[in-house]
Image (spheres, rainbow, N blue to C red):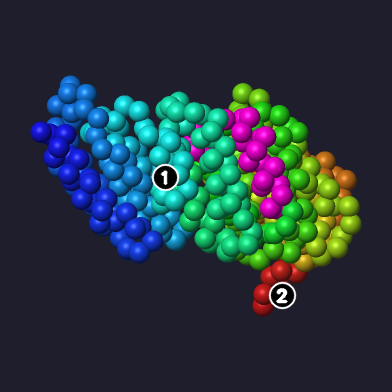
């Protein structure tokens, strides 16, 4: 009897919404429907499991449509989507209703609502059904519905939601052999999909970058210097998010997180120094911001600027002769210094000052003044004063005179 009640509920609901293109259900209403079904049927989960009943196919087909409306929002929050798919959708189907084997063959039907892709991803994660066929279908749908530059990037961003279970389950062979080539293709055609690529990377859970060559494919091969130097402020924000997303899939065991900073980003920074064109200066500024934001986004105990990284930053800052570039990067340089060990800063400053005691710009002098103020060693303080003392005094007088 319980089976009959459940079947009737879903059969009638499916009749009402099966023509999903002609009906409209808000995301809130779809969410409420899942909550009510879980609450209504939850008390009977044990009975359903013990009886081992096979429910009507319309249970899963109805869920496909409700998932479609649950996710059909502009720029959805992917962390929220992952939680709702787990706590509402999968909990109802494979927990409350005790469906042991997802009907993957039904989810392969192209006439179903896009919510089918969520359920296919669940099949992949559970290791159920024809894994190769499911993977091929999801990869093909990812290419046609997300990685399609004939559609607005905002539309593609929304469609990433349907692939969250797939992205969480997919491994190295599929990512590097099938998904990455698609990304490389689209990034050669447009600069508007950087945020979309970042969203895809953020969804990956079982995949990690383990080799420097692969890391370069994900970074320097995808993002040219021209994109760094000419992008809008919105694009630059997207690039920061992209870099953070790459960092999130870098293998710590293979030292790829350090490699992302030193072997990729810092190396790109050094390459932009081959020339002093305006474009190169903008690219350098963008890379510095990306590196700092990446470090600053880590857990509090991990926000540390290494000696090697600080050396690159300070050497460039003090050797730069263009006033506009010094002014543009000064604030981010101060931030780098704030996350470094004071001893590292002093050890690096002294050779720079001895080599070039005539500091050219007030922004550079500020770094020296800050370190003098924080220095506790009288001998080290005297050493700095002997090298640049006269210039610091004249610079301070000049700054105060101008302010008057």
Q: Which residue is mark 2?
A: 402
Tell me the magenta residue range: 165-187
Q: Earlier in the sequence, mark 2 or mark 1?
A: 1
Q: Residues within 10 Å of mark 1 (few under 14, many from 20)?
A: many
Taking 116 as reference, is 362 left or right? right
Q: In the picture, which quadrant includes the N terminus?
A: top left
Residue 230 drawn at (x, y percent): 74, 64
Q: Which residue is mark 1?
A: 116
Residue drawn at x 32%, y 51% is 66
Residue 4 drawn at (x, y percent): 15, 37
Residue 38 drawn at (x, y percent): 21, 41
User: Where is 145 relative to 400, above or below?
Assistant: above
Residue farthest to the top, as pictured: 50
Res 130 visible: yes
Task: Report if residue 184 lies within the magenta region.
Answer: yes
Residue nearest the viewer, comparing 90 with 138: 138
Residue nearest the viewer, comparing 217 with 341: 217
Residue drawn at x 54%, y 33% is 133
């Amino acid at each position: 009897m319980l089976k009959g009640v459940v079947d009737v509920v879903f059969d009638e609901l499916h009749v009402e919404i099966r023509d999903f293109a002609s009906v409209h259900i808000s995301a809130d209403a779809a969410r409420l429907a899942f909550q009510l079904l879980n609450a209504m049927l939850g008390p009977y989960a044990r009975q359903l499991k013990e009886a081992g009943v096979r429910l009507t196919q319309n249970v899963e087909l109805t869920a496909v449509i409700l998932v479609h409306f649950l996710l059909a929002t502009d720029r959805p929050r992917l962390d929220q989507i992952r939680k709702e798919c787990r706590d509402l959708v999968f909990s109802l189907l494979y927990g409350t209703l005790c469906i042991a084997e997802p009907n993957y063959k039904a989810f392969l039907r192209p006439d179903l609502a896009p919510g089918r892709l969520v359920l296919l991803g669940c099949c992949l994660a559970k290791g159920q059904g024809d894994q190769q066929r499911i993977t091929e279908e999801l990869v093909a749908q990812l290419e046609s519905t997300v990685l399609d530059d004939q559609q607005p990037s905002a539309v593609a961003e929304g469609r990433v939601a349907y692939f969250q279970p797939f992205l969480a389950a997919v491994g190295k062979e599929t990512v590097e052999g099938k998904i990455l080539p698609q990304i490389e293709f689209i990034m050669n055609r447009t600069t508007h999909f950087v945020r979309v690529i970042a969203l895809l990377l953020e969804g990956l859970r079982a995949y990690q970058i383990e080799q420097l060559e692969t890391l370069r494919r994900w970074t320097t091969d995808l993002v040219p210097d021209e994109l760094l130097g000419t992008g809008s402020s919105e694009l630059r924000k997207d690039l920061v998010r992209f870099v953070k997303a790459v960092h999130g899939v870098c293998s710590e065991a293979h030292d790829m997180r350090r490699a992302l900073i030193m072997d990729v980003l810092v190396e790109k920074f050094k390459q932009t120094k081959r020339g002093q064109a305006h474009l190169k200066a903008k690219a350098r500024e963008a890379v510095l911001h990306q590196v700092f934001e990446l470090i600053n986004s880590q857990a509090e105990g991990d926000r540390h600027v290494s000696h090697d990284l600080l050396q690159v930053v300070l050497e460039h800052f003090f050797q730069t002769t263009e006033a506009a570039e010094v002014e543009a990067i000064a604030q981010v340089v101060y931030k780098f210094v704030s996350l470094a060990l004071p001893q590292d800063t002093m050890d690096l400053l002294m050779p720079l000052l001895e080599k070039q005691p005539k500091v050219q710009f007030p922004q550079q002098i500020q770094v020296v003044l800050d370190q003098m103020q924080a220095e506790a060693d009288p001998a080290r303080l005297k050493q700095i004063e002997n090298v640049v003392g006269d210039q610091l005094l004249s610079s301070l007088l000049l700054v105060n005179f101008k302010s008057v």
